[in-house]
Amino acid sequence: MDCSDFISEFIKDDLASGRFSCVHTRFPPEPNGWLHIGHCKAMTVDFMAAERFGGKCNLRFDDTNPEKEDLSYVKAIKRDIKWLGFDWEDREYYASDYYEYLYGLAVKIIKKGRAYVDDLSEEEISEYRGTAVPDRNYITLTPPGRNSPWRDRSVEENLELFAAMRAGKYADGEKTLRAKIDMTDPNLVMRDPVMYRIRRAVHYRTGNSWCIYPMYDFQHPLSDAKEGITHSLCSLEYEIHRPLYEWFIREAEVFPSRQIEFARLNLTRTVLSKRYLLRLVEEKHVSGWDDPRMPTLAGLRRRGYTPAALRNFVAQIGIAKTDSTVEFAFLEYCLREDLNKTSRRVMAVLRPLKLIVENWPSEKIEDLEAVNNPEDENAGTRIIRFGKELWIERDDFEENPPPKYFRLFPGNAVRLRYGYIVTCTGCDKDAGGNIIAVRCNYDPETKGGNALDNRKVKGTIHWLNAADAIPLEARIYDYLFTAEKPLNTPEKPDGTNSSFLDNLNLASLEVISGAMGEPCLAEAKPGERFQFERLGYFVRDCPAISDCNGDGVDSAHPPASSHLVFNKTVGLRDTWAKIVKKE
């Protein structure tokens, strides 16, 4: 994927003007959760911009919030980036490695009289800064804030107090270090933002070495400067923070990175915020970060998504300056495009119903040839066995069919995929009147649709030979939310706002334990993808994503034949094409 035009033009201008002699970007995740598909867009922009201009891209963990960060998140992030196909080589950095450097820059800004130690509480700081309010014409105004009573402390006192903060002489929240900018600035971000706060929390890398931690807005641009980042490519919500980043760069007198913003990814039927995703995990609405219903990269991977499909999706939607929302169906379209070319075809029956071929000899077994992938001539063929008793889908038989039903019913004929045309002769029922088997006769002149076959039938169904079919568990997934935009929550009857959790799809997972599949599925590796003919795309479940290597296949843990689990990735029907046609 090429970097988008407007970002490319900015970079080209910077190189042509001599502002920068090279291109150096970075992907800066915070290790407070697992990456989701929105991060896929961000990292693609960062890595591909550097690649296009022959530059470098760092991986930097912005780990300045010890209460929410963990080494397990670092490992998960690195694993997902590698799975997508990006490599940072030896350019792995941590903001926590810069704590001494950042502290020194804060001291420098204090000495210039541009920062002060404040005694206001977090709530009081918010009150003094003020809030944006709409006027009678619905124009947002920001009335001037109020200066802190401690804003005019001397440089010497501020240096002494800041050193005492570092030494642990004050309680959490008792003091903060704030930039001295302008409490009347219409941009609330510029109203004396906090640079450091006191937090006695154990950091996953630095332990108890520090009890003061830099705020994100202070650390982020100065970490970029430390690494010599030329182009800080950020999502659009950071545009309002750019004046503050530039202020810190000027006052600290460091390398002046250039920030360029682009619209973040918004996707229907899901939420793309680690805060909301963490809540889903902690409250056990899902089984974990890698639940196949989650929009995390690990969840999508376990669902059966491929790196190629995700990267193509990002390429197709492009990088714009204006926020928009992408239909989830388009993501599924990009996935089908890839899986159709790469997935091996097999047959499976999710809800088995016995089909007895009455005129087939009881002991006879015939080998039939089946195509592995019609889109790939190198995929070859496989042998499937045909016998007297078969499994078919329960939905493929109706004793009293509705109009335009072209599958099996008494007197009707269908073709068995790769096999023969059979005509239904009736069905067997148990004492309760439930259908337990369907009976039919086969036409020996119709094997595999040969040239002599002049019979025309309207239906073709898939099947399995009952004697060698293997049991498996199928997990059928639907969208995690019922609403197109889960965060747009309406008011409840009592006038309160509903939670995004009210839009959870309680039927988003169906577990089918009695499914059957071709014998070859017993050898499927975790993460291996298939097209179950007529049913959709499925993937052998990889419950321990952290054990899987880069291609999604867990080579260290062979599949357990006693319990095969396949997750449905996506159906065969292209809902995106219907959306386009409708529009």
Image (cartoon, helix red, strand yellow):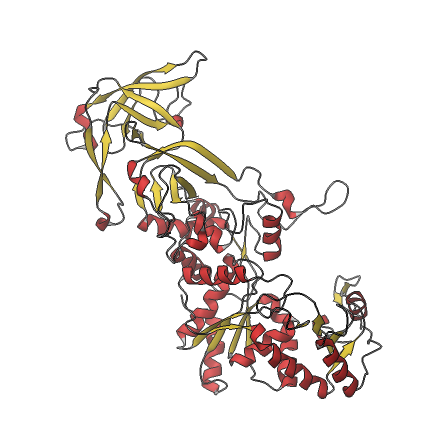
In the orientation shown, which residue stands out farthest toward the left?
Answer: 452
Residue displayed at 64% across by 45% down: 501
Viewer-nearest residue: 73 or 29? 73
The quarter of the rendered structure image containing the N terminus is: bottom left
Residue displayed at 79% across by 84% down: 157
Residue 565 visible in the snapshot: yes
Residue displayed at 74% across by 86% down: 113
| Residue 183 x/y as whole percent | 77, 76
- When asked about the image quadrant of residue 210, the answer is bottom right
Viewer-nearest residue: 406 or 204? 204
| Residue 13 x/y as whole percent | 48, 81
Residue 570 visible in the snapshot: no
Viewer-nearest residue: 549 or 491? 549
- When asked about the image quadrant of residue 457, the answer is top left
Residue displayed at 71% across by 71% down: 197
Count of labels in the image: 0
In the orientation shown, which residue stands out farthest toward the front?
Answer: 208
Residue 225's place in the image compared with 438, above or below, is below
Image side of residue 564 versus residue 153, left or right: left
| Residue 366 x/y as whole percent | 19, 29
Image side of residue 6 versus residue 241, left or right: left
Residue 550's place in the image compared with 533, above or below, is below
